[in-house]
Amino acid sequence: MATAPTPTRPAHAGPPGLSSDLRKAAALVVDGNPTTRMTLAGQLRTMGLTSVSQASRIAEARRELERHQFDVVVCGDSFPKEGGSGQELLDDLRRSGLLPYATVFILLTTEATYLKVAEAAESSVDSYIVRPYSAGSLVDRIEQARQRKAALYDIYRALEAGRPDDALALCRQRFEQRGPQWLQAARLGAEILLRLERFGEAAALFQQVWDSEPRPWALLGVARAQLDGGAPHEAQATLTALIEAEPDYPDAYDVLGRVQTELGHFQAALENLEKAVELTPMAIGRQQRLGMLAYFCGNRDKARELLERSTYLGLDSKMFDSEGLVLLALSAFEHAQPAQVERHLGELRKRLRQQPHDVRLQRFVDAVGVLSHLQQGHTEKAANQAASLCRQTGAPDFDMEAACNLLTLLSLVQRRGLALPDDRAVVEQLGRRFATSKAMGELLANAAHAHTAYADLLRTSQDEMVQLIERAVRRASQGEPEPALQDLARTAQATLNARAVESAWLVLQRYRAQLPQADAWQQRIGALRTDYGTARNKPALGDRRLRPSGGVNLGPLDRPASPPADEA
């Protein structure tokens, strides 16, 4: 059991790294062996730390780190009873932003193999200690780690103050001057550029790091910037080269799976996500991403197994994505398991109470609520709630994930006999908006597989959209850019299709000099692009707000926006 809650200290109360600060620090010891745990806690108290908590299991440590802020975490590497490791715990904490910058994470292990050390370095372990060790070496490692963090303190302070451009300037200066922690400073700078959607600059900075000191995260960063910047084929080539050099780098398989999903190469994406899971079998996020893709590719049994395992591993963790509960509820409804539907709905409602302004969570609750009403015989309530979801399909934040969920829901309830007015119009609208390629059309059709008529309608809608857009683009190339732009703008406005929006934008840029009122067109198409362009309509798996594979925590740039004052 963990000890009593540790008082939370304010983030960035001062630069870490001073010996006098250590006596005021709060520490967490995580180890499955009670004797080792007590010994470590005693050593830390001997160093002067007065607040030392303990956890015997990975799940227990996650809960403590979610609830309280610690200055130092000393964690064992192996937890055989759970089948996990301290390394995997750290990977999940880093990816989900649960470990504040100021926290020093020390990993204790009985091995010093190259692979272990490389894994620790790639996960940004602050220090790596091999047993047996002396109490003096432990305190030295903690002090050294705190001093390294102090070197980057000004960068994080600028981020906390809402000055990302100032933080970026500090990063560039440190990198150019090869000052203290210059590699990490460059990495932070490139991540800031990614968050600011300055993808070309981000790719260039990551490439400069790779050319100076080849690190896998740097080449991965190049690929991430290429993908986010709209160049998935370039990203695929970069990742292929990275995996040839680093065949056991799970983040590379994660991002490659994302690239291949975007390109519509679903079987290859499944294989690469599965490889990432094999390399890190306790990683909750990877289990879920693979399960989500398997579900919408039609392999529902495999999806259910993966999603149930991720629920078992970390339902109470902030790293758990609630989309998994929606897919499990849909699967339970399809298999006539009403108790399971109600259980998942109860968990989703609990999460919504904790985050009442989360629109994504509200849609999850509403979708599973339709299933609950229907299986209880409340047909009218089910129909009204489904209709409410259908009215949201034109919202800018109604994304590919929401579309797939709604299509699965509509196909299941239709098969159960719930007739909805204008259901075919809604399905056609979803097809016209989100079927931006043949592959995306197939993904939508797979989501609606329970009702063949819907799946056929989605494929037809996709074919019609391709013909409309290609005809307009061909017209522009034949010397009629203004009528072509008018056609594309009408199509984009009517369907909200990202491919139509981006095609209109490209025609505008290419033929701008020949277009009357080009500035007015720029404003009109630009507004559509902000709300409905490709950047907002990629087939991402899971919550976009969770830490991307290979990314690092940037504090306030990664925190969700606070609700408006009148809603709080």
Image (tube, grey):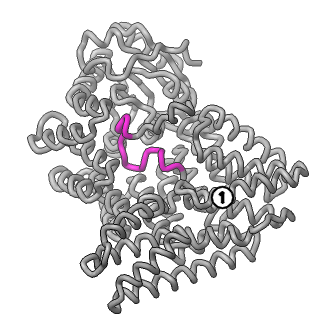
Point 41% across, 24% down: residue: 73
Q: Specify the quadrant that holds the N terminus.
A: top right
For residue 32, say whether it is visible.
Answer: no
Q: Position of residue 98 (x, y in %)?
A: 45, 33
Judging from the image, what secondary structure is the residue with disc 1 in?
helix
Q: x and y percent of residue 438 in the render?
A: 54, 78
Q: Quadrant of residue 113?
A: top left
Q: Nearer the viewer, residue 398 or 248?
A: 398
- Look at the image and give the residue range highlighted in magenta: 543-557
Judge from the rendering whether residue 94 lies leftward or rightward of residue 461; answer left or right.
left
Q: Is residue 552 magenta?
A: yes
Q: Residue at x 29, y 12 (%)?
A: 21
Q: Residue at x 83, y 50 (%)?
A: 381
Residue that mark 1 sits on: 405
Spot occupied by residue 497 in the image (x, y as percentages of width and height): 51, 70
Query: Is residue 7 positioned above or below 94 on the image?
Result: above
Name the outermost residue toward the right.
Answer: 377
Q: Evaluate whether residue 351 shows in this view.
A: yes
Q: How many numbered dots are placed on residues in this image?
A: 1
